[in-house]
Amino acid sequence: MAAPLLESEVDAFRKVFKMYRRRNPPPDFSDVIDFSKASPSEKIVPVQLDTHAVSDVDTARVGLKPVKQWQASGLRGYPGFIFIANPFLSDSQHFWIKQCLKTYPQKPNVCNLDLHMAPADTEDIWGKSAPSLSCHTDLRKPKTLLEKLRWVTLGYHYNWDVKTYSPSHHTPFPSDLQLLSRHIAAACSFPGFSAEAAILNYYRSNSSLGIHVDESELDHSQPLLSYSFGQSAIFLLGGRRKQDAPTAMFMHSGDVMVMSGQSRLLYHAVPRIVPAPEELRDPVSVPPQDSRVVESVPAEDWLVCRRYIQDSRVNVTVRQVLAAGESFPDNVRSTTEESKKRRHDSSEDDADM
Ligand code: OGA
Ligand code: MN
């Protein structure tokens, strides 16, 4: 029988989640780890990456710095957790942000708006939103589709109702994001990683993401990769039990988080979006070189992206669903029904997924 919980242990995670989500009075952020500034300490340990796994030419093609320049850290007590503080080349975030806002929400990918809108109305989310977003903001104006976007799924489309992936609901995974993810996983000593599913989360300034574990993937020996763009967030990393007290850290634009090994199945949550630090607020753009996956973003597109991320954050979590050579078991429901349940909520504090 499991040991009874101490009074102080009961939902320690929930308490911390509520504290960081509180508006009035605002919480004290002094205990939140900032990996962009942190040096090795009691809590933070340097992580040795595989600097030979990916060539400098290959990392540059997807907009990443050479692996030997990445600043990778781990957290004591969380084996398999790797935080890579913004490994992107200065010009490439524009491209990935544009992909998240203009390209990935396009059909055949699936998004929350598909649940209550006709297919024709969600066909061109970017085109329908860009003109209004790029001109001056007027708070009385109705929200654009882009501002109503909460999630997009790629590859094996996650079914929110039954919390599974299925072979019958699959569309091609974007090759650029596949390559980026493969290189990052390889540098973290997972050379066999294959990006098969992704969930993109679109957070407005008052959004949060409830306490959960990502366990729907059939293979947990491969890591979960998470990319952050736009405004910053407080990320809480807990334990194997839902009530375990979490560690709080900032995720800034460009940061990459890898949950692998014993950290792959830990509870986590995003209680709060916080303004990006001044120096990270407006990533610069320089002309790209040839032969790259990453292309330059036209000025008119960047205007829209820039406006959007001024008060939003985009998170991309990339997952391998099946082990190499594995297939779905026969009993996996082949439903294409999507749930009306929303994962993000600014009014619920513990929306389990
Ligand atoms: C998820 C997730 C965290 C984030 O999508 O499963 O945990 O940083 N996202 O937004
Ligand atoms: Mn998650």
Image: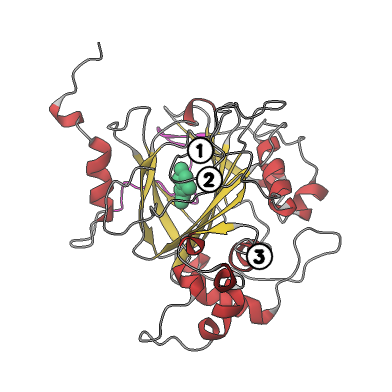
Q: Secondary structure at mark 1?
A: loop
| Residue mark closest to the camera, 3 vs 2 | 2
Mark 2 — residue?
Answer: 158
Residue 43 falls inside the magenta stretch: yes
Quadrant (top left/top right/bottom left/bottom right) for the C terminus: top left
Q: Residues within 10 Å of mark 1 (few under 14, many from 20)?
A: some
Mark 3 — residue?
Answer: 103
Q: Position of residue 230 (x, y in %)?
A: 51, 64
- Rounded to the nearest angstrom, the CA distance separating label 3 from label 1 is 25 Å
Mark 3 sits near ligand 1, with its Cβ under 8 Å away = no
Q: Position of residue 84 (x, y in %)?
A: 57, 44
Q: Secondary structure at mark 3?
A: helix
Q: Residues within 10 Å of mark 2 (few under 14, many from 20)?
A: many
Mark found first going from the N terminus, 2 or 1:
2
Mark 1 — residue?
Answer: 164
Q: Secondary structure at mark 2?
A: loop
Quadrant (top left/top right/bottom left/bottom right) for the N terminus: top left
**Residue sitting at x 82%, y 50%:** 57
**Residue sitting at x 78%, y 58%:** 293
Q: Between residue 196 and residue 169, name the one nearer to us.
A: 169
Mark found first going from the N terminus, 3 or 1:
3
